[in-house]
Image (tube, coloured by chain):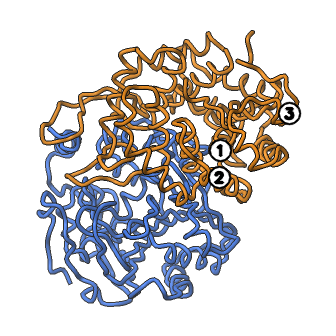
Amino acid sequence: MHFLRGGFAAPFFCPHFLNLGYNDDIMEHSASETAALVERLRSFSLLDGGLPYYRGNASSAEPTLLAALALSVSGAPAERAKPLLAWAQKLQNPDGSVGVDPGHRDQGVWLTALGAIVLHHFGLAENAKRALDFLLSLRSVTAPKDPRLRQDDTLTGWPWVPGTFGWVEPTAWSLIALSLSGLSGHPRAEEGVRFLVDRQIPSGGWNYGNPALDGKELLFFWDTTGLALVALHGHGDPTRVGASLELIEKNQGKIESLSGLSWAVLCLKGYGRDAGRARVKLLNVMGSLREEEFHAGNFALGLIALSGKKVFIP
Amino acid sequence: MKRREFLKNTVVLANAAAFGGLTHGAQQASVPCPVTLLPMPDYGRDMEKEIAAIMAGDGLVLKGKKVLLKPNFVEAHPERPINTNPSVIAGVAHACLRLGAAQVIVGEASGHRRDPWFSVLNPSLRSILDKKVRCVDLNHGDAVAVPNKGGLTGLPHFYLAKPVAEADVLINLPKMKTHHWVGVTLCLKNLFGVLPGIYYGWPKNLLHFRGIERSILDLARTVKVHYSIIDGVVGMEGDGPIMGKAKPVGALVLSPFPLAADATAARMMGFDPRKIFYLVQAGRFLPGLRQEDVVIRGERPGRFATRFDCLEEFKGMRGGPFF
């Protein structure tokens, strides 16, 4: 089995052996700091092989999948990701979907997109293909076009829950999954791009769904903005997301949350922009989280961002 | 047709079919429902002792209990009064400790924000809470399937966040706000926030498709709430629950009866609860809709009576004067 795509035979956390691509960033923190963060994440591992969102909970798909990816890009030995992947593979349903956890396999199938990304990353081609097949069959509900609205509800994206409308986050994750698997030209991917561009707030950024309501622009969120930007990378003219990118780049120093900072770093690095301030803040936040704030999924995302590896961009 | 209209029409038609039109229907038998109005001109006042005294006076026993506080904390925003104010949450949390609660958890599954930093893990809340009080992001974590006791949505069960299912006592802490879908959001609507986003999404669009009002009613039947405290110190009028404007009212509304709290708050806002569809329907199985069943304690309600601005489509809810 081709377990680790571009696997790491390198010594654990030795930056000289890691082709991270961001040497300036690597110098900002020591390998031991990263190792400590990775170990903190690993301390959440449960006996069944998975990770919970927060300590005291059962293993769940999202933190487990993101942790597998985080270990891989942080240079951990391949065998450390194996229990996580085995847990995720067992979770996959016969139709290819990935749900919340073994007790609720039919719930939260929006997680299939992340499943496809991680399974593809580790070269688990058969599992990844089944996940992609499910994603391609999953369609959001649409509504007739209303000329009074800027938003085009005829566009199909991806829903959180089957049988409901499409939203920014599940559509962005699904688009990333398709793009990484070489399906960026698939009609569903192209429509997903149109969906995300359509949902962009005119002055920049993304809310979780509509760009505006009753003629008023909605608030933009750091996380959905960063995620949508990452998903749209390489899809058409980058100037159409320029305002959103500027928004994150200029305001990166104002972002406080682990999730927001992680997505800011991921998207700015993805577009070759300066992510220095966000990255420093991200390190500080990750190093000072209290136990009740420790969301293992977001922490894993933070590690992925710190690694500098563009795992969400083909 | 707008997406919003599409959903709204679905809700209205489905409800009309299910409930036989906008009639009041058979109401719950008359039960005296105490509702206390606690004057609170601003959030600067320490309210722990007063809240503890009122809850104890209402017969709420917390000694040795695991208590979950469910605020409306959906979108940390420095200017808009979207959330139950942290001072109110802290006041209630500390009152619970004062009354001997073994464990106090503040939990929320924000329907707007997936990032917990903008919800109950926001420093504005944590920084003023006693260290014994835990803040829990209910969007991400274990859930327990419980049978849907209402059956209006057709959902066989609800996935409740585990801390909610495991709590001995659930105290609901909504904000007094208008709502662009259902008119007002108070105690009953606030129960959407016991359902984890990883199951229902952001927003909980599945509940919209099944009918927001039906979902409110199903949850009101399914989730046992032991006490309710509405933050009406500063409410939100107009295009609530996110985009509206601040509306000072200057009171907390406390009651063991959620519908009585909602109906009283609606009257304080200048709305007739008998014209708010889901409150009327809740009156079929919960006491407290009728004004004559509400026993007001504390301050005179007339002192807080006001008139919340609302979207055009909800102006038909207006009524009063009630006090």
Q: Where does residue B184 sit, x and y in percent of width and height?
A: 27, 62
Q: Where does residue A140 sit, x and y in percent of width and height?
A: 35, 28
Q: Is residue A297 above or below residue A155?
A: below
- Viewer-closest of A245 and B219: A245
Residue beneath disc 1: A302
Chain A: drawing colour? orange
Which badge, 3 or 2, comes first in the chain's sequence?
3
Using the image, tell me which numbered label, if any, was put on residue A282.
Answer: 2
Q: Where does residue B228 sit, x and y in percent of width and height?
A: 44, 69
Using the image, tell me which numbered label, if any, was put on residue A70.
Answer: none
The residue shown at (66%, 54%) is A280
Amino acid of disc 1: Gly
**Mark 3, secondary structure of its residue:** loop
Q: Where does residue B106 sit, x and y in percent of width and height?
A: 57, 64
Residue beneath disc 3: A12
Direction from residue B245 to residue B104 in the image, left or right:
right
The residue shown at (20%, 52%) is A214
Q: Is residue B235 above or below residue A48?
A: below
C-alpha distance separating marks 3 and 2: 22 Å
User: What is the tally of numbered marks visible in this picture?
Assistant: 3
